[in-house]
Image: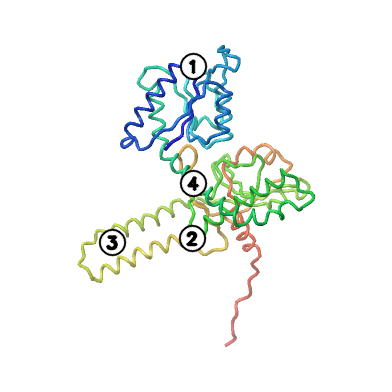
Amino acid sequence: MIVLLIVEDDEQEQKSWEQVIEMHNANITDNGFEIAFDIAPSLEKAKELIASRNYDAAVVDIRLKQANGNSGPNTDGDLVLEVLLRSEMAVVALFTGESTLAAPPAWAKRVVGVFTKGGGENEGTPAVMKWLRAQAPMIRQVKAAQQTIKREMAKVFYHSIWPRWNNWTQNPGATEDFISTAITRHITSHVYAVLLAESQQGVHPEEWYFVPPLQDKINTGDLIRKADGSIEIIITPRCDLQRNDKNETIQLATCKDVSAEWKKRCEKITTAKLALQNHGLPAGDKGIKKLEESLADANEALRRFTQHSNSTVFHFLPQMKMLDGTEIGPFYVQFDKIRSIVRTTDDVKVILPTQRFASLTPEFLPSLVERLGSFFSRIGTPDYSHPD
């Protein structure tokens, strides 16, 4: 089921939505999901409903009647959008007769749908419903994730936080805001650790990166795209970046694009799988074992590749997909190709922040730093040779 908020003040439009949703729910088998909905005719009612219920999707008109009954020109729907974007994991469609009034934030323009009221082929409620059905797979996955997170939050509450509540409150200097923030961090770290263990440490490539970076200022693990298109990663320790007087320079390591080698190894796996599936050999034939060994070798070759090719010089970073759908990488961070730039220059103050396009997440940053330390801590010993 998808829980939908409709923010619309026109009674005829409200009735139209009721009819459209009733028709949708009458054919759940074909449509794939049921819709439960609330209607808010004003900004105030929308805020009230958002505060009291979790929504998966919202359709928002721009001009709304105000609390004093005034229906004059306004853009209250944009204010509803602001509330939704900062409080709900919901897909949002702006639905208005004046599309020029739709003003989603710049960062949200790619994900907020804008639809025009009317009877054209690509207008009106049919267009919005088509868009909503297209978002349904993502909504289902997000709802499943929320349920899993809620389950794990309940576990840590009953097994750890509640029994140890006094330990959270006995610190004389701990304010309520500090305690709530600390509990939030504790719960989220617990949830991640448990879910990672349940998946036997297997992760999705998207988990490696924040795209775009979450923080406004440069940080360790930020990926930089230079003017010539080459990629670098900031490896300066976080503690040094926090203090302007700590050191004079910032260090960046080259990220070598190894997509050609990656694709070659993936293709070998695909070829080996197809050969094994379509061999046509009788059961027990020795040729089958050779095909199985060939597939195992191809998988092992790819595994070694993701394990930095057994080299201390490289650190593997998986492929990432950008917001426009393009794929970049995977990369080998090259610890033998590091440059330093003076942090007081325009390169750091102006250019570098604009070149950031992604950053490693906290779970995968320590591995980069650890391998960097291992690279520089190598001493080596002379080769032993015995005289004849």
Give neighbour class at mark 1: few <14, some 14-19, many 20+ (Cα, 10 Å).
few
Q: Nearer the viewer, mark 4 or mark 3?
A: 4
| Amino acid residing under circle 2 | Gln
Q: Position of residue 171 (x, y in %)?
A: 77, 52
Q: Position of residue 354 (x, y in %)?
A: 62, 37
Q: Nearer the viewer, mark 2 or mark 4?
A: 4
Give neighbour class at mark 4: few <14, some 14-19, many 20+ (Cα, 10 Å).
few
Quickly name the residue at label 1: 98
Quickly name the residue at label 2: 200
| Amino acid residing under circle 4 | Ala
Q: CA distance from mark 1 to mark 4?
A: 36 Å
Which secondary structure, mark 2? Answer: loop
| Amino acid residing under circle 1 | Glu
Whether residues under marks 4 and 3 lie with C-beta atoms below 8 angstroms apart, the answer is: no
Q: Is residue 283 visible?
A: yes
The quadrant of the picture occupied by the N terminus is: top left
Q: In the displayed image of the protein, which residue is found farthest to the bottom?
A: 388
